[in-house]
Image (cartoon, coloured by chain):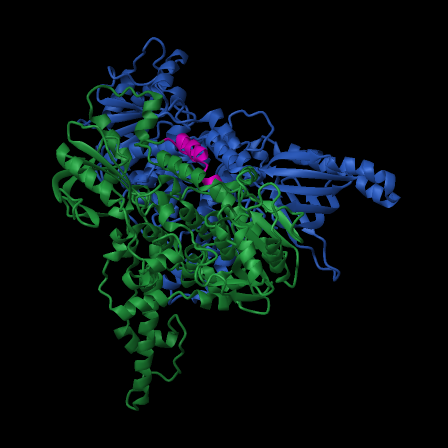
């Protein structure tokens, strides 16, 4: 097995784990192909030590070796006993910076062991082959492999639309991924447009991402489409099939809005590279609006800067505010929310159809379409509906999870295609939850779990970049689905918002800077103690459940539950019950 | 009243402050002796108390009329457009005079009449008894006693009559020390920590200049330090920045020289003066009042205002104070220049961290009465109650409330009161509707005969305390956690939206967790009551032999015991749990209340929307 070659030292005794805010723990460190384990020293009565750390190595973003002990070694050699010198000379510290932003320190006796552990961890965490990743090896006893993979088929989504209108059809033209490699096999398109037109229209769109239906607004029958940019190029090419497709989407009457997630200038410049945006002359019934949203490298840098600022607890107020500002993260949150609100507003108030695209149509496009649906559609705000939305608008829609979340904010590796678009989406949903605390069925905790699992997971849900790749890797046959785990009654309960009540209205958030907040639960999670906030949340939970379910459950019992929940375990959720 | 020339103007427009397209409501503006009233076409009333008006500004005439901008001390900003310039001018002049009364007897408190009988009014004034409070702390005792030195305000006009000093401090020492302190404000007890036997004392700066000494003052400090049997070394905390304190030496004032005083440890904590705070707030309001504000200009504006830096400095000082007492058992003497601004902030916040009593509704009233009102924080000058020196106005008390708010955010279960309580107090500090905050010191208040002529705020707040209760408050929490140790890393400090945008509802969360929890616990209480009544009824019935409903003894546990649930009586008479959907209301969930609605006007235009980057951002923020 290839993994074995990477593991130079499998087991080290007397390792000290320290982790901000908690007393250090001593124990035995083991390294396996996918995990770092630390079990505390067994007690005198021979009982098994408890597992204190169960860290998925994929979660490690950066490994830093500290040499500060060497200098101590120098001074101690002169005036300490021989015994001390030996110990001191061979103590190394490894700092593990994780993708979920926590930072751990391991003090390892023996310089060689220390270096081995560090290099093994580094090597194992950067294994890039999808098939070698943990989800392909994770086999919990309580779950079946096929569970959860067919929970939200596009067919169901389509049937709901079909029950309202006959204007749309489910096309399987992309069944073998030849028209568009990043689209799923089935997509929803205007009923009047046949597969041949789709094939030709696809050639006029970057990556073959022709306009498809993303959301049908039942209230007034308007639709939201998404695509990639048209390949207008410097010679102002046109494509009749693309024009037919978009005009068919408008269904006879009415006008539509094209929301381009680039600035007008950037869209124009894209023509030089063969891209561009729909000119009014060829698409007379569509009106273009530009809402520039950041993505790619600048967004990743924004994330890195924010995490850096949050981790520096010595910052003065002025420095903190200026770093928060220069990270621009909250500006991106505002930009994304505003663009989604604009999209929602075009549909809800102007009763117009909308086409959203940027360049490739796999990042900011999905951010806007997914967010607009949370704002517009109460069904997307339930736990199941939200999972369905993620499945449809992120996973099947071909958001390149494998590329985007290979590294997080700490990595020293050269960045390739990393960008926390999905995290930005989660942050925006969190902001919605802050402003409408009873309108989301799920809690902040679900958003945190999703954040963790996009970067490192024991489930296959967020693996690969597209459905095509997932099929090649047999992800749905050989890994477990995150949804199957989340939907187990015990887990589901933990991720529900106790305050939720169905709210049929559109939730229009305030996007003023005064109304937006730093997501402390995520960015400061491992930095400051949230004990009192967690206790207060448990109390809210207790008050609400004792009020609503009084006959079923005694309130005292609920409190115990909530408090357990509040103390979030150090191990990655889900992996701890394995083995 | 002689100031009012026009009492009613019709067709006045009230403009949405943050709207970029000048969205407005049309209605009628009325001017009364105490309030400005605007009633819009949907009969919604906006009342503005004249005393709340901080500034009135008449802007240049526009085609639709004459704009009038009114800024209030409670951070409400209203923007009217009056159709005729003459009306606008009249209102402007009237408001200028009405908002800056020349003498105390013009203040609202002297005309406010809540139709309460005399004995109740007097009772209201007796609600907070400071002698009782000192007794609660454990003074007088073997080390501390009540001094009659200031019984007739003879040695310090801005102090209360009753002051607690160390037993070993004789009258000549007190008098001598007061002569060596700015405004005669010699060191006195502010808070006594019963368990640690350590004290918080307060005073003003010494008149030390570059080298002056005062034996009595040195004795006074010595007396304070030995009044703490556990630890004789005491801290002297000068809350000013060192530079300011040194500059004061040139004016014959200054700070204590460690060499001249036995057993003191001297420390600066660097809180800025009232002028810096005033201009900081001004900058903050300018930023937060900007139309179409971007995130980055908001954050850089927040940084440049320095406001949160000042709040952090004040809280940090309070933490140093509280820790010195709770951890080191040391007595601390706090002063600034005159000892009525920063000293009040630090002493009161320090006490709040140390003593859970001040985290109750009644306790918080006591704290304000003690450290702010009785020790002579100059409410009248700082709030600009009368037409006076604008340089005396400063948001010192507002900062104190903001410090408390930050604590409530970090310790959601430690406080009996909620944010609404803090906001309401802030409202009334400026409203001049009640007598409590009028004047600058107790002597002045006695001269104004406030207790005879006005009402006290506290009983009114207590009467409606339901509104101010924190549903998450946990008394046990206080026992568990006597000393609050807030985290003051910069990222914990947030812009207090509900204070500075209290009246800009569109910025607030659309659903309130707090209201929901309040309503739910209300319902719980009601159910519990119903349950008890039912139980009593059933017991009665059980006594009647023919009515044998159930054999099992009824337990008084809540929630409902299974026996009860099945009993026919329960089913028939207990109201079902009300549907909670109705209480999860949503405020303003229509696009009209959100300012991104306005760019739809842009969409409606015929020409293609070529939007530049900046323009796009700006429009989105509207």
Task: Specify the farthest residue to the right.
Answer: A82
Residue B531 is inside the magenta segment: no
Could you say where residue B109 lies in the image, as x and y percent from the top left? 27, 56
- What is the number of callouts on the image? 0
Q: Which chain is drawn using blue?
A: A
* On screen, residue B394 above or below A209: below
> What range of the chain is rendered magenta?
B294-309
Q: Main secondary structure of the magenta part?
A: helix
Q: Nearer the viewer, residue A147 or B233?
A: B233
Residue drawn at x 35%, y 71% as measured from the top left: B528
Q: Which chain is drawn using green?
A: B
Q: Is residue A106 left or right of residue B11?
A: right
Task: Specify the farthest residue to the bottom.
Answer: B545
* On screen, residue A203 above or below A305: above
Q: Nearer the viewer, residue A429 or B562?
A: A429
Q: Nearer the viewer, residue B102 or B35?
A: B102
Residue B306 is inside the magenta segment: yes
Could you say where residue B295 lies in the image, as x and y percent from the top left? 40, 32
Instruction: Locate the C terminus of chain B by quadrant.
Output: top left
* On screen, residue A236 above or below A120: above
Q: Within the image, what quadrant is residue A343 found in? A: top left
Q: Is residue A141 visible?
A: no
Q: Is residue B477 left or right of residue B167?
A: left
Q: Is residue B253 left or right of residue B595?
A: right
Residue drawn at x 72%, y 41% as measured from the top left: A10
Q: Is residue B313 visible?
A: yes
Q: Within the image, what quadrant is residue B559 found in? A: bottom left
Task: Specify the farthest residue to the top.
Answer: A235
Could you say where residue A58 lies in the image, as x and y percent from the top left? 59, 37
* On screen, residue B455 above or below B256: below
Could you say where residue B146 lies in the image, as x and y percent from the top left? 51, 66
Residue drawn at x 74%, y 62% as measured from the top left: A45
């Amino acid at each position: 097995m290839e993994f074995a070659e990477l593991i130079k030292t499998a087991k080290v005794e007397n390792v000290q784990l320290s982790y901000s805010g908690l007393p250090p723990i001593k124990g035995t460190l083991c390294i396996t192909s996918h995990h770092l384990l630390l079990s505390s020293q067994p007690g005198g009565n021979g009982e098994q030590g408890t597992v204190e750390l169960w860290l998925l190595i994929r979660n490690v973003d950066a490994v830093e070796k500290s040499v500060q002990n060497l200098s101590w070694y120098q001074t101690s050699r002169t005036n300490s006993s021989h015994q001390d010198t030996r110990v001191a000379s061979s103590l190394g510290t490894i700092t593990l910076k994780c993708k979920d932003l926590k930072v751990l320190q391991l003090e390892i006796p023996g310089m060689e062991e220390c270096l081995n552990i560090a290099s093994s961890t580094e090597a194992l965490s950067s294994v890039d082959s999808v098939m070698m990743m943990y989800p392909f090896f994770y086999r919990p006893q309580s779950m079946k492999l096929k569970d959860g993979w067919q929970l939200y088929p596009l067919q169901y989504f389509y049937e709901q639309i079909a029950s309202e209108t006959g204007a749309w059809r489910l096309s399987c033209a992309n069944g073998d991924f030849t028209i568009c490699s990043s689209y799923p096999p089935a997509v929803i398109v205007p009923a009047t447009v046949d597969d041949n037109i789709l094939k030709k229209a696809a050639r006029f769109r970057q990556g073959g991402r022709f306009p498809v239906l993303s959301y049908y607004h039942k209230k007034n029958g308007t639709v939201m489409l998404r695509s990639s940019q048209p390949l207008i190029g410097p010679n102002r090419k046109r494509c009749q099939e693309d024009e037919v497709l978009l005009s068919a989407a408008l269904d006879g009457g009415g006008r539509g809005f094209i929301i381009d997630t680039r600035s007008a200038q950037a869209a124009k410049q894209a023509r030089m590279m063969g891209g561009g945006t729909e000119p009014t002359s060829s698409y007379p019934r569509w009106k273009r609006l530009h809402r520039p949203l950041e993505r790619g490298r600048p967004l990743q840098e924004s994330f890195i800067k924010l995490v850096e600022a949050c981790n520096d607890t010595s910052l003065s107020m002025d420095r903190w505010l200026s770093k928060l500002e220069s990270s621009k993260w909250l500006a991106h949150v505002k930009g994304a929310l505003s663009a989604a609100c604009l999209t929602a507003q075009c549909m809800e108030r102007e009763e117009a159809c909308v086409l959203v695209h940027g360049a490739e149509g796999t990042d900011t496009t999905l951010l806007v379409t997914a967010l607009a649906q949370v704002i517009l559609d109460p069904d997307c705000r339930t736990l199941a509906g939200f999972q369905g939305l993620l499945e449809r608008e992120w996973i099947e829609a071909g958001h390149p999870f494998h590329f985007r979340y290979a590294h997080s904010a700490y990595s020293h590796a050269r960045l390739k295609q990393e960008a926390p678009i999905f995290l930005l989406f989660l942050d925006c949903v969190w902001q919605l939850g802050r402003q409408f605390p009873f309108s989301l069925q799920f809690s902040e905790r679900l958003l945190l779990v999703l954040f963790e699992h996009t970067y490192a997971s024991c489930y296959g849900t967020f693996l690969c970049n597209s459905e095509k790749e997932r099929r090649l890797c047999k992800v749905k046959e050989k890994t477990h689905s995150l949804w199957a785990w989340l939907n187990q009654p015990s887990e589901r309960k933990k991720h529900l918002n106790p305050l939720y009540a169905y709210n049929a209205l559109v939730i229009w958030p305030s996007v003023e800077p005064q109304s937006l907040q730093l997501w402390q639960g995520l960015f400061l999670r491992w930095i400051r103690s949230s004990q009192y906030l967690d206790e207060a949340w448990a109390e809210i939970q207790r008050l609400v459940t004792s009020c609503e379910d009084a006959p079923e459950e005694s309130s005292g019992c609920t409190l115990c539950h909530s408090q357990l929940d509040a103390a979030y375990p150090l191990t990655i959720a889900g992996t701890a019950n394995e083995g | 009243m002689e100031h009012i020339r026009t009492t009613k103007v019709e067709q006045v427009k009230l403009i949405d402050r943050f709207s970029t397209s000048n969205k407005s409501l049309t209605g009628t503006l009325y001017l009364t002796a105490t309030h400005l009233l605007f009633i819009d076409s949907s009969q919604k009333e906006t009342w503005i108390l004249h005393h709340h008006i901080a500034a009135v500004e008449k802007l240049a005439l526009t085609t639709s009329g004459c704009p009038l901008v009114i800024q209030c001390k409670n951070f409400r900003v209203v923007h009217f457009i009056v159709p005729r310039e003459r009306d606008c001018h009249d209102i402007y002049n009237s408001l200028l005079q009405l908002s800056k009364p020349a003498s105390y007897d013009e203040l609202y408190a002297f005309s406010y009449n809540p139709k309460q009988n005399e004995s109740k009014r007097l009772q209201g004034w007796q609600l907070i008894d400071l002698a009782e409070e000192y007794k609660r702390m454990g003074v007088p005792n073997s080390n501390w006693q009540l001094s009659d030195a200031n019984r007739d305000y003879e040695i310090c006009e801005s102090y209360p009559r009753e002051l607690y000093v160390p037993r070993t401090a004789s009258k000549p020492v007190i008098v001598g020390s007061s002569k060596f302190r700015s405004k005669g404000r010699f060191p006195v007890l502010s808070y006594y920590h019963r368990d640690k036997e350590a004290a918080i004392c307060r005073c003003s700066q010494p008149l030390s200049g570059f080298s002056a000494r005062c034996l009595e003052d040195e004795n006074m400090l010595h007396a304070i330090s030995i009044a703490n049997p556990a630890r004789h070394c005491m801290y002297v905390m000068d809350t000013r920045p060192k530079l300011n304190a040194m500059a004061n030496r040139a004016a014959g004032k200054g700070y204590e020289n460690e060499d001249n005083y036995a057993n003191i440890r001297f420390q600066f904590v660097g809180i800025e003066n009232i002028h810096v705070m005033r201009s900081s707030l001004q900058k903050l309001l300018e930023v937060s009042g900007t139309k179409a504000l971007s995130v980055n200009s908001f954050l850089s504006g927040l940084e440049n205002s320095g406001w949160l830096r000042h709040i952090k400095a004040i809280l940090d000082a309070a933490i140093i104070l509280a820790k010195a007492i709770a951890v080191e058992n040391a007595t601390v003497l706090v002063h600034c220049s005159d000892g009525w601004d920063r000293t009040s902030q630090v002493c009161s916040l320090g006490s709040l961290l140390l003593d859970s009593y001040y985290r109750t509704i009644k306790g918080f009233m006591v704290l304000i009465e003690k450290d702010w009102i009785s020790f002579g924080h100059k409410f009248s000058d700082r709030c600009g109650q009368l037409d006076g020196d604008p340089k005396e106005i400063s948001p010192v008390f507002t900062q104190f409330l903001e410090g408390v708010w930050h604590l409530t955010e970090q310790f959601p279960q430690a406080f009996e009161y909620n944010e609404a309580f803090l906001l309401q107090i802030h409202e009334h500090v400026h409203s001049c509707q009640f007598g409590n905050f009028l004047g600058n010191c107790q002597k002045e208040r006695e001269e104004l005969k406030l207790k005879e002529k006005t009402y006290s705020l506290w009983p009114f707040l207590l009467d409606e305390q339901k509104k101010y209760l924190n549903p998450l408050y946990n008394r046990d929490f206080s026992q568990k956690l006597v000393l609050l140790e807030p985290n003051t890393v910069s990222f914990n400090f947030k812009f207090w939206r509900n204070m500075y945008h209290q009246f800009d509802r569109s910025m607030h969360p659309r659903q309130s967790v707090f209201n929901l929890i309040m309503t739910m616990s209300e319902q719980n209480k009601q159910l519990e009551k119903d349950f008890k009544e039912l139980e009593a009824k059933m017991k009665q019935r059980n006594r009647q032999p023919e009515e044998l409903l159930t054999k099992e003894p009824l337990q008084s546990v809540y929630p409902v015991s299974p026996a009860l649930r099945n009993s026919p009586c329960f089913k028939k008479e207990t109201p079902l749990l009300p549907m909670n959907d109705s209480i999860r209301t949503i405020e303003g969930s229509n696009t009209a209340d959100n300012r991104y609605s306005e760019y739809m006007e842009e969409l409606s235009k015929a020409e293609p929307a070529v939007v530049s980057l900046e323009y796009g951002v700006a429009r989105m923020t509207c």
